[in-house]
Image (cartoon, rainbow, N blue to C red):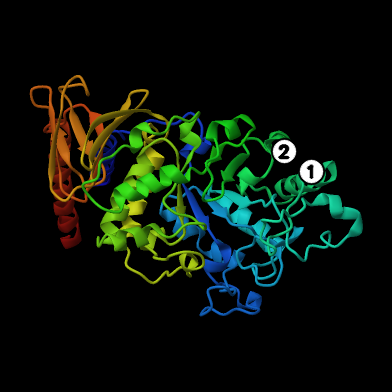
C-alpha cells in the first residue's frame, strides 16, 4: 500500500508538471517602463492614526480629512494585490496650516505633522520595498509657503523672483533657481531625502515653471545618489511643454495633458474616431505617464457621467488601453471605484474602501497580465485595425506576440486579421475574458462584444492532450486501488 501511495504521488507530480508552460517569457530585469503607479494624495486616502487628526473636518473639502502615512502603509497589500508596483505620494513636507495638499512648504526637512513622523514615513518606504514596490514623492521646487522663514529674511530677498504687476498678489513666493544658493538649498534637500529614506523617485510639480538649466543639474546630481532613480515631471494643466526637450535635461517622463484629454474624449463615450495612436512622437514613449486624471484635473468619471454612460464599462476599456500601450500607467486614487468629482477640491474627495469590487477585480486582472507579459511593457507597437471606436493593435517582444482588441462602440464588432498582420496556423488565447480564436485559412476572426476588451497571446494550436488525459486515467485507477486496499486493511 505504501508503494501504491508513492506511485500515486509521483504520477500526480508528473501530471501537473506536464501541464502547458506559462505563455509569458521572463524579463531580463525590471525597469521603470514595467511599473504600474498608483498616485495618492495622502490626506484624502486613509486615516489610520487618529493622533494626527488635528483640525480634521471631513465635511470641509478645503480642510484636513485625516489621511496619513500609516493609512497608506495599511493599504499596501490592497494596492499590491491589484497589481500596482509603485506608489506616488503628493507632497509630504511640512506645510503652512491648511496645506492638506502639501504644496505650501515651510520646511523641506520635515514631514507634515498631519501625515505622521519621518520615522513612520521611513517605515512606509521599507514596507513598500518589502513588497517589491517602489515609492515616488513630490519634490516642490517652484515655490514655498508665504510663512517660510526665508520669505521675510532680508538677507534672502534675492532667493525669490519679483512679482509682476499682472501676477496674483496671493501667489506663493516664487523661488529663483538661478541663484546658486537656492539651487544648492534645493539640491541638498533632494539628496537628503534619497539618502535618509531610500525613496525611488521624485515627481516634480510645475516642472515647466522652473528653468531647464536647473533641471539639467538637478537630474544629474540626484541620479548619482541612487541607481535607477526616476524623475516624473508634472506640468501645469495648461502647459504645452516640449516633452522631448525635458527628456534631454534628464526628466524621464512628463505629463502630456493634451494626450490625456484625447484619451478622455475617446473613452468617455462610444463610437468615436480614434486618432490617439498616431499622435505620440516622443522619445522613449515607454517612460511617458499614461493617465486619465490627477490632482489638477476633474475626474474622468465626471466626463463619463456627462455623456450618460455607465462609469464601470468606460473605465474598463480605458484602463485596458493604458495598461497595454507604451508608457507607464499612473492611476489616481479612487479610480478603482470610479470616484467622481469636478474642479479642485471636488476632485479630491476621500477614498471609499466600502464599495463594489467589480472594477477592482478587473484592474487586478489587468495588473496581473501587465506584470506577466513583457510584450505589454516593452514590445513594439503596431495598429492593425481602427474604425469608429473599435481598435486592434499588436505588441511584440522577442517571441511573445500580444493582440489587444478594444471595442469602444455601442455594438458587437467582428474584425478579421490576415496572415500579413499575424502569423497563420496558430491560435489567439484570450487572457482577460478567456476567448479562444483559432486560425482558419490563415485568418483570425475576432468577435468582441460592446464595452469589452480582450488581451490575446499568440500560441500553437491546442488540441486534445492525450498524454495528460491518459495520466489522469492512470491516477484515477491507482487512487481507486488505493482506496480499496485501505478499506480491506481497515476491515482486517
Q: Mark 1 and mark 2: span between their CA atoms?
A: 7 Å
Near-viewer residue (189 or 390): 390
Near-viewer residue (204 or 457): 204
Q: Where is residue 401 in the image (x, y as percent from the top left)?
A: 30, 28
Tag 1 secondary structure:
helix
Q: Where is residue 240 in the image (x, y as percent from the top left)?
A: 52, 41
46 relative position to 211: left or right: left
Crowdedness near tag 2: few (<14), some (14–19) or many (≥20) residues, C-alpha within 10 Å: some
The residue carrying mark 1 is 183
Tag 2 secondary structure:
helix
Residue ID at (50%, 28%): 283
Number of marks in picture: 2
Residue ID at (16%, 24%): 418
* First of labels 1, 2 by sequence position: 1
Residue ID at (56%, 80%): 57
Near-viewer residue (412 or 276): 276
Q: Position of residue 310 (x, y in %)?
A: 25, 61
Check residue 341 in the rendering and tell me which mark sits there, or answer none: none
**Residue 147 higher or lower than 134, as above or below:** below
Residue 157 in which image quadrant? bottom right
Residue 101 in which image quadrant? bottom right
**Residue 21 higher or lower than 316, as above or below:** above
Q: Position of residue 345 (x, y in %)?
A: 51, 67
Asked whether the residues under the numbered discs 1 and 2 touch, taking CB atoms below 8 Å apart as contact, a structural biologist would say: yes
Check residue 214 in the rendering and tell me which mark sits there, or answer none: 2
Crowdedness near tag 1: few (<14), some (14–19) or many (≥20) residues, C-alpha within 10 Å: some
Amino acid at each position: 500500500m505504501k508503494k501504491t501511495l508513492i506511485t500515486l504521488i509521483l504520477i500526480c507530480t508528473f501530471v501537473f508538471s506536464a501541464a502547458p508552460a506559462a505563455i509569458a517569457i521572463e524579463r531580463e530585469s525590471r525597469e521603470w517602463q514595467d511599473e504600474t503607479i498608483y498616485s495618492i494624495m495622502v490626506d484624502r486616502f486613509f486615516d489610520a492614526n487618529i493622533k494626527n487628526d488635528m483640525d480634521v473636518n471631513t465635511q470641509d473639502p478645503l480642510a484636513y480629512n485625516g489621511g496619513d502615512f500609516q493609512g497608506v502603509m495599511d493599504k499596501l497589500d490592497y494596492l499590491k494585490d491589484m497589481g500596482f508596483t509603485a506608489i506616488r505620494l503628493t507632497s509630504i513636507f511640512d506645510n503652512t496650516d491648511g496645506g492638506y495638499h502639501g504644496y505650501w512648504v515651510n520646511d523641506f526637512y520635515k514631514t507634515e505633522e498631519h501625515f505622521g513622523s519621518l520615522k513612520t514615513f521611513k517605515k512606509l518606504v521599507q514596507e513598500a520595498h518589502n513588497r517589491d514596490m517602489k515609492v515616488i514623492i513630490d519634490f516642490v521646487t517652484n515655490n514655498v509657503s508665504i510663512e517660510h522663514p526665508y520669505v521675510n529674511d532680508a538677507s534672502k530677498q534675492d532667493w525669490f523672483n519679483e512679482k509682476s504687476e499682472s501676477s496674483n498678489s496671493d501667489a506663493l513666493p516664487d523661488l529663483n533657481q538661478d541663484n546658486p544658493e537656492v539651487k544648492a538649498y534645493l539640491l541638498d534637500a533632494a539628496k537628503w531625502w534619497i539618502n535618509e529614506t531610500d525613496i525611488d523617485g521624485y515627481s516634480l510639480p510645475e516642472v515647466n515653471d522652473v528653468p531647464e538649466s536647473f533641471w539639467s543639474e538637478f537630474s544629474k546630481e540626484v541620479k548619482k545618489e541612487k541607481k535607477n532613480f526616476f524623475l516624473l515631471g508634472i506640468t501645469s494643466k495648461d502647459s504645452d511643454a516640449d516633452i522631448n526637450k525635458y527628456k534631454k535635461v534628464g526628466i524621464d517622463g512628463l505629463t502630456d495633458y493634451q494626450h490625456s484629454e484625447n484619451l478622455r474624449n475617446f473613452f468617455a463615450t462610444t463610437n468615436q474616431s480614434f486618432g490617439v495612436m498616431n499622435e505620440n512622437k516622443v522619445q522613449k514613449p515607454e517612460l511617458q505617464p499614461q493617465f486619465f486624471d490627477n490632482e489638477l484635473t476633474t475626474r474622468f468619471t465626471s466626463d463619463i457621467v456627462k455623456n450618460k454612460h455607465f462609469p464601470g464599462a468606460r473605465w474598463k476599456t480605458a484602463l485596458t488601453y493604458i495598461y497595454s500601450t507604451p508608457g507607464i500607467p499612473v492611476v489616481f486614487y479612487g479610480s478603482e471605484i470610479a470616484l467622481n468629482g469636478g474642479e479642485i477640491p471636488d476632485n479630491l474627495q476621500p477614498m471609499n474602501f466600502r464599495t463594489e469590487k467589480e472594477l477592482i477585480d478587473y484592474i487586478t486582472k489587468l495588473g496581473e497580465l501587465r506584470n506577466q507579459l513583457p510584450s505589454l511593457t516593452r514590445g513594439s507597437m503596431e495598429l492593425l485595425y481602427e474604425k469608429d471606436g473599435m481598435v486592434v493593435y499588436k505588441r511584440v517582444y522577442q517571441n511573445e506576440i500580444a493582440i489587444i482588441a478594444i471595442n469602444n462602440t455601442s455594438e458587437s464588432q467582428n474584425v478579421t486579421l490576415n496572415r500579413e498582420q499575424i502569423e497563420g496556423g496558430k491560435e489567439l488565447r484570450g487572457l482577460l475574458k478567456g476567448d479562444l480564436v483559432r486560425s482558419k485559412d490563415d485568418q483570425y476572426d475576432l468577435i468582441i462584444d460592446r464595452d469589452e476588451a480582450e488581451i490575446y497571446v499568440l500560441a500553437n494550436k491546442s488540441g486534445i492532450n492525450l498524454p495528460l488525459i491518459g495520466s489522469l486515467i492512470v491516477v484515477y485507477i491507482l487512487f481507486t486501488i488505493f482506496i480499496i486496499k485501505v478499506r480491506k486493511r481497515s476491515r482486517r
